[in-house]
Every structure is written in C-alpha cells, then in structure tokens.
Image: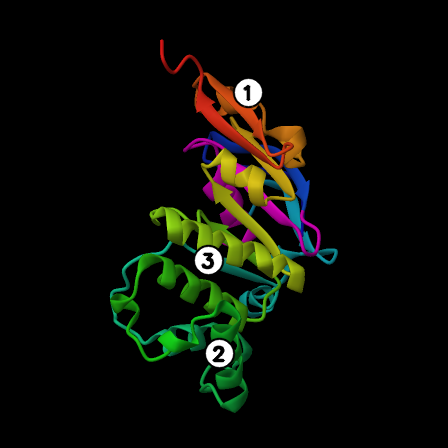
C-alpha cells in the first residue's frame, strides 16, 4: 500500500497535510500521535471510506478510489478495538462473517467459507472457543476473534485501531505477539497506538503524525526518541535503552522531583 501526498479537509479545516509513506509486504507499521492529529482520518482514507482532497492511496499501483468495495475488501481488512457486541453471535459465526466479501449479494457461506473460518480460528489458537458467544469471552479473546475474522476475509493488509487498547497486561502481550506473528505469513499490519514502548518493540516502521503532517517516519531506532515523544504528547520523557537497545522504555523525566 502506497500513500502519496495525502491531503484531506473537513470543509475549511485541513486535517491531513501531505502524508506520504509506503507499507511493504510483511511489515508491521505503527502510527503514533496524540488524539486529534488525523490518525482516524488517515485510516478512513486508507479504507476507502473518505475520498482525499488530493493525493492517493494505491495498492499494487491501483488507486483504491477506482476499486469497488468488494474489490478493496479482498486487499484490506479493518480490525476495530475490542468491544462488547450488541448481538451474542458465536465465535464461529463472527469469524464466518469475514468471508462474505467473497460471496454474491444473495449467496450464503458454503463449505469453502466454513473451511476458511475454521482455519482462521486455528491460526489464532481459539478453535476451542468456536461455539462460545462473543459476549461471554474475555476482551483479549474477542480481539483475537476480530483478527480471525479479518484473516477469513483473506485480505493481506490489516488495518488495526489500537488493537491492544482496553486489554489487561497479559492479554495485551498475547494479542500483540499474535499480531506480530502474522507478518511472517506475509500480512502487512498497520496499527494506530498511543504506546511508544509497544511501537518500538513490535514495529518495523513507525509513522508519527503531528498537526496533520508526518513528523517522523522510519525504523523504531530512528524514530523513538526523547524529542519525538515530548513533541507528540507534550510531556518531558526520557527514553531508556534496555537489553542492548532491543527495548526502549519511556519514563517521565525528573519523576522524583
């Protein structure tokens, strides 16, 4: 997926101001930035829900604005934050919904779609939950169900809105480890996050948005720094390196003063 000089405005309010980056096959990309800088608008443009004022979003050289919704869904899947569903669908039925992009308007899922749903459950390690109601499982398990639904959709670009938000520490680690493992299977992961430690630990590239512009783009080693985090979030921090710079942890500066 290639985002080139993307600009978007709500009326006279300019939200995105020339955002450019490219997501390669098998990359994990984190989009960092405080609330209100355009992360959600960027994702809506990438999903074809908003048409840019100018610039383009292309997949394999083709502008997504020239694709039908069905065509785009074969390339890109969206995973929202885990939530409590209104209807208590079973885990299997929720994952099976991901296959509808492959069907005609009045067609029903058949053996091939059921096999895809079963394979996605197995890939996420949640086959044992297949007959449970989505309202009766943990937040971490629901997030894995949503990822399994995207896998059943057979799209190779997964756009995730803070996939570990609202999860406890254990579930957060399990979900992020599972998401990262998908890149080995050729999936491109693009997530929004407010956690710079997480962005450093799991990402191949980080995109920092500020004021609708790209403040930083590059590897975690190139991007996660005192100055970047302080500028993004308006706080004084010290980025501490651990385990030979395998991990960087942001801590408040002068915490004991």
- How far is disc 2 from disc 1 in space, using C-alphas? 44 Å
Name the foreground residue: 117 vs 226. Answer: 226
Given the current orientation, which residue lies at the most extreme top position?
257
Location of residue 240 with respect to 144 vertically, above or below: above
Return the residue at label 2. Answer: 117
- Mark 2 surroundings within 10 Å by alpha-carbon count, few (fewer than 14), some (14 through 19), many (20 or more): many
Q: Secondary structure at mark 1?
A: helix
Q: Earlier in the sequence, mark 1 or mark 3?
A: 3
Which residue is label 1 attached to?
226
Q: Is residue 50 magenta?
A: no
Q: Secondary structure at mark 3?
A: strand
**Label 1 crowding class (10 Å Cα cut-off): few <14, some 14-19, many 20+?**
some
- State the residue at coordinates (53%, 71%): 123
Q: What is the x, y in percent for residue 157?
A: 60, 59
- For the residue pair 89 and 18, the one nearer the viewer reads as 89
Q: Earlier in the sequence, mark 2 or mark 1?
A: 2
Q: Residues within 10 Å of mark 3 (few under 14, many from 20)?
A: many
Check residue 44 for magenta coloring.
yes
Please give the label number shown on residue 79: 3
The answer, for residue 50, to whether it is visible in the render is no
Magenta residues span: 23-49
Image position, residue 158 (x, y; %): 55, 58
- Could you say where residue 26 lies in the image, as x and y percent from the top left? 68, 56
């Amino acid at each position: 997926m290639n985002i080139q000089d993307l600009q978007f405005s709500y009326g006279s309010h300019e939200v995105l101001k020339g955002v450019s980056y490219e997501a390669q096959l098998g990359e994990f990309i984190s989009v960092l930035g405080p609330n209100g800088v355009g992360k959600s608008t960027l994702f809506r443009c990438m999903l074809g829900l908003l048409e840019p004022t100018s610039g383009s979003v292309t997949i394999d050289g083709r502008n997504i604005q020239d694709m039908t919704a069905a065509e785009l869904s074969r390339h890109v899947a969206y995973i929202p934050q885990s939530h409590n569903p209104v209807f208590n669908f079973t885990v299997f039925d929720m994952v099976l919904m991901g296959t509808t992009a492959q069907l005609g308007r009045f067609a029903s899922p058949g053996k091939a779609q059921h096999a895809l749903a079963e394979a996605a459950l197995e890939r996420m390690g949640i086959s044992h939950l297949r007959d449970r109601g989505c309202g009766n499982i943990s937040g971490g398990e629901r997030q894995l169900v949503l990822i399994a639904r995207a896998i059943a959709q057979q799209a190779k670009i997964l756009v995730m809105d803070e996939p570990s938000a609202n999860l406890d520490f254990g579930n957060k680690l399990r979900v992020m480890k599972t998401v990262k493992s998908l890149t080995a299977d050729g999936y491109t992961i693009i997530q929004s996050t407010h956690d710079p430690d997480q962005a450093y630990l799991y990402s191949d590239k980080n995109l920092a948005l500020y004021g609708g512009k790209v403040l930083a783009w590059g590897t975690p080693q190139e991007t996660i720094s005192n100055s970047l985090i302080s500028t993004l979030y308006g706080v004084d921090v010290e980025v501490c390196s651990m385990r030979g710079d395998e991990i960087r942890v942001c801590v408040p500066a002068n915490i004991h003063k």
